């Protein structure tokens, strides 16, 4: 495989992994909010979600 193809493949894999992490955290947040009666902020604290990412998760929870 040429270097360019390998780079494109690696980027795709990294992007897929990042999306999987986001989806997994969203799923965990939704379950904690519904089943443990936590606020979104409490759930994000438990999951140790960085402050700079919280707005994105809050927006995604609203959808």
Image (cartoon, helix red, strand yellow):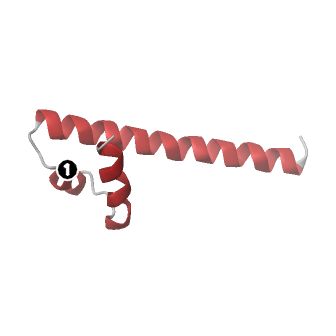
Q: Which residue does the image show at 31% across and 66% down from the upper left?
A: 51
| Residue 9 picture quarter | top right
Residue drawn where x is 33% and y is 59% of the image: 55
Left or right of 33 on screen, residue 54 = right
Structural crowding at the residue carrying mark 1, measured as other residues with C-alpha within 10 Å and reported as few (<14), some (14–19) or many (≥20): some
Q: In this orientation, which residue lies closer to the viewer: 52 or 45?
A: 52
> Residue lying furthest right in this view?
2
Q: Is the N terminus in the top left, top right, bottom left or bottom right quadrant? A: top right
Extreme-left residue of the structure: 37
Mark 1 residue element = helix
- Relative height, residue 55 to residue 21 (above, below): below
Q: Residue at x 80, y 45 (%)?
A: 6
- The residue that disc 1 covers is 40
x, y (%) of residue 11? 69, 49
The residue sitting at 87% across, 50% down in the picture is 3
Query: In the picture, residue 63 is in which quadrant?
Result: top left
């Amino acid at each position: 495989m040429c270097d360019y193809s390998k780079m494109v493949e690696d980027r795709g894999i990294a992007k897929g992994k990042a999306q999987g992490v986001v989806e997994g955290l969203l799923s965990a947040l939704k379950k904690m909010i519904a089943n443990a009666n936590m606020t979104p902020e409490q759930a994000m604290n438990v999951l140790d979600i960085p402050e700079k990412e919280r707005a994105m998760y809050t927006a995604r929870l609203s959808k």
